[in-house]
Structures are given as C-alpha cells and as structure tokens.
Image (cartoon, helix red, strand yellow):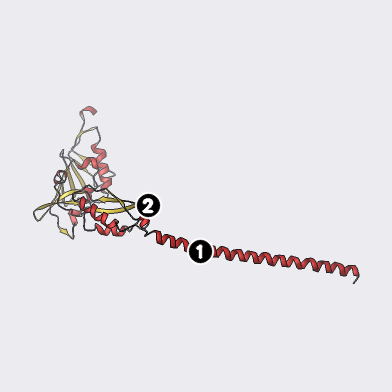
Amino acid sequence: MTSEAVRVGARRRVTRKPAAKSRRRTVARRRAWRRRIVALAALAAALFAAYTFWLRDSSLVAVRDVSVVGLRSEGSGEVRAELERAAAGMTTLNVREDELIAAVRDHPTVASVAAHPSFPSGLEIEVTERPPVALLSVDGRDLPVAGDGTVLPPSEAADDRQLPPIEGAEVSSGKVSGDALAQARILGAAPAPLRSLIVASSHDESGIQVELADGIELRFGDASEAAVKWSAASRILADGGLGSLTYIDLGAPERPAVGGATASPGSV
C-alpha cells in the first residue's frame, strides 16, 4: 500500500467517527424529548383530572338558580318543589338527572324530566306532562287517564271534566289495560284542533269508535297507526266539497271509507 493510500484511508476513518457520534447524539436527544413529552402529558392529564373532579362538586358551580318549565297540571306546585329540593344539592358540572326523575316518580302527571345546566349556577328543568285524554269512572270517582293508559289524579279543571268517558275500564297498578287502553291510545293521538270535538269513545267487536260533536262517527278498528288514521280523518273533515257525512271508516287509513256523505251546496 502506498503512502497516499494510507493517508486517504486515515482521512476516511477520521470523517466516519464524528458522523457516527453525531447520529448517536441526535437519537439520544430525540429519546429525551419523547420522555419529556410523555411526562408532560401525564402531568397535564393528572392536573386536568384533579381540577375537573374538584371543580365539578365545588361550591363555585353549585346550582343556585333553578327554573322549572312545562308544568301546567293541577298539583304542579308540589312537583316544582320536589325538583327544586333535588336540584339544591347539585352543581352545573354534576347534574344527576336520575335523582330528579326519582324525586317526581310518585307523580303520574310527569312523563319525563330533562335537565339543562347553565354555567356557572343555573339549571333549567324541563318537565313533559301526561295530558288527560278521557275520564274513567273508578269507585264512584271520575279520574282522568292519559294517552298511555296512566291514571291521573282527580282534577277540578273545567276542560278535564268535559273529557270523553271510557266505560268499563279496569285499573291495575295505576294503569288501564285491554279495550280501555286501546281507546286511550286513540284519544291520545288526536290532533289538537279535533280534541275539543270528541264527545264519546266506545269499543265493540268491530273495534274502536270515536263520536264527534256534530254526530260523525270515526271508526278506527284497532289502535294501530292511530296518528295516521287521525291524519286521514282530518283530511276528509277539512274537505270543503263534503256537505255532511255520518261516519268515516279508518280501518285502512290509506283508503278511508266515508258513509252518508252528501255534496256541499257550494260545490254543486
């Protein structure tokens, strides 16, 4: 080997060693940064958890302003008081909706409860009530019943006393069943503009019949597709081309049948 070759080989060895050391230092720095990032992330998570769990039950976010909306029935004052008492021990970051529901479980007029917190100290409680749709005669008393068959407390409201009766209903565990339940479901699905026109409901071997104030009988058959059947009845009743009719058969709501219909004088 010539002296020139020896010098070239030496230069190559000299240049390779610093490059290798530089790569090792770069790898070491990257590993150190990864460890720092992992440690910082763990610390941030721990601080966030501690902050959250401390703050969620802190007096800084305690519920102080409770608003209860949706109550319209008699006895709503007691429902409101029960909900306000239950909400008093909560915070806007820790609203326990199950406790609100439990607080009014013994009030059959309440169908559901939803809570809407407003940071830092407000809470709106939205109550959905069961409106009465008919009257039952139970042990000599007229009791309202909701569309899902739930028997409601006695009412002195004039509108409630004018509800259509359901005869022969049997009550078990605060609810009706059988034919009475089917009638309640039909009446509960009635659109608002027609509810005041309903005067009676009955059930026989052909199904459920609902009588309107002008003497028209709505024949529903069973309680299935109640809303669809009411929609079909509404379209026919709103038809200005009909002068009068005696019944509407809604057993097949896509093809309702009309009985005793005459043409409106203005349409001739």
Q: Which residue is painted at 21% across and 58% down in the image?
A: 106
Q: Which residue is painted at 10% across and 53% down in the image?
A: 141
Residue nearer the viewer, 118 or 113 = 118
Residue nearer the viewer, 8 or 56 = 56
Q: Which label was assigned to residue 57?
A: none
Rendered location of residue 131, percent (x, y): 22, 49
Q: Earlier in the sequence, mark 1 or mark 2?
A: 1
- Total count of labels: 2
Q: Residue furthest front?
A: 59
Q: Is residue 165 visible?
A: yes
In the picture, residue 246 is in which quadrant? top left
Looking at the picture, does residue 46 appear above or below residue 240?
Answer: below
Q: Quadrant of the N terminus?
A: bottom right
- Image-based side of 102 in relation to 197, left or right: right
Q: Amino acid at mark 1?
A: Leu
Q: Residue furthest right?
A: 2
Q: Is residue 222 visible?
A: no
Residue nearer the viewer, 26 or 151 = 26
Please give the residue where the numbered disc 1 appears in the rendered image.
Answer: 43
- Image-based side of 112 in relation to 46, left or right: left
Looking at the picture, does residue 10 appear above or below residue 83?
Answer: below
Helix or strand or loop: what does disc 2 sit on?
loop
Q: Which label was assigned to residue 120?
A: 2
Helix or strand or loop: what does disc 1 sit on?
helix
Crowd around label 2: few <14 · some 14–19 · many ≥20 (10 Å):
some
Q: Amino acid at mark 2?
A: Pro
Give me the C-alpha separation between circle 1 and circle 2. Answer: 27 Å
Q: Quadrant of the C terminus?
A: top left
